[in-house]
Amino acid sequence: MLAETDDDPDGLLYVPKSYKDGVPMPLLVYLHGLSGDANSSRSLWPLADEFGVILLAPESRRVTWGRDAPGFDRDHWPDLADPVWANKIHSYYGTTPYYDRPLK
C-alpha cells in the first residue's frame, strides 16, 4: 500500500518476486476505469511476475473523468457492446473508434 494506513491507501505497488536490488526493472502504471479501484490491479500481479515489471496502481480520490459523458450513470450501466452507445462516447470525446481506423 502507498499510504500511512490501510484505511486510506493512495494505491498499490507490486514488486515482482524476481526483483533484485539495484537492477533496473520496467514500471507499468495501471490506471483503473471509472468504477474501479487500485485493487483491480491485483489480477495483474501474476503477469507482473511473468514479465518482470513493477506494477503501480494509483487510487482515484473521486470521479475525475467521464462523469458528464453520455451513458455513465453509476446506477444504470450501459451495454458496453452497444455500437450506438460507443459512437456517442467517441463523439463526446472526439475520438475515432478502433473499428473505424484503417488497418496498418
Image (cartoon, rainbow, N blue to C red):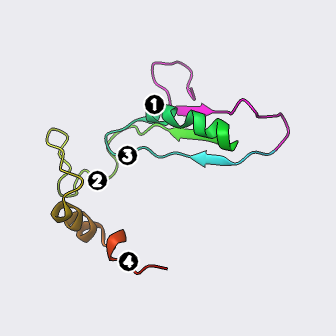
State if disc 1 and disc 3 touch (CB < 8 Å): no
Asked if the residue under mark 3 is in contact with the one under mark 2, i.e. CB atoms within 8 Å, the reply is no
Residue beneath disc 4: 101
Residue shown at the point (24%, 67%) measured from the top left: 92
Looking at the image, tell me whether mark 3 or mark 1 is earlier in sequence order: 3
Q: Amino acid at mark 3?
A: Gly
Q: In front: mark 4 or mark 2?
A: 4
Please report whichever mark, 2 or 1, sits nearer to the chain's N-terminal start: 1
Q: What residue is pinned by disc 2?
A: 66
Q: Is residue 39 left or right of residue 52?
A: left
- Name which of mark 4 and mark 2 comes first in the sequence: 2
The answer to whether residue 95 of the structure is visible from this angle is no
Q: Secondary structure at mark 2?
A: loop
Q: Amino acid at mark 1?
A: Asn
Q: Which residues are magenta?
A: 1-23
Near mark 2 (Cα within 10 A), the count class, few <14, some 14-19 or many ≥20, is some
Q: Residues within 10 Å of mark 4 (few under 14, many from 20)?
A: few
Q: Earlier in the sequence, mark 3 or mark 4?
A: 3
Q: Secondary structure at mark 4?
A: loop
Residue 16 found in image quarter: top right
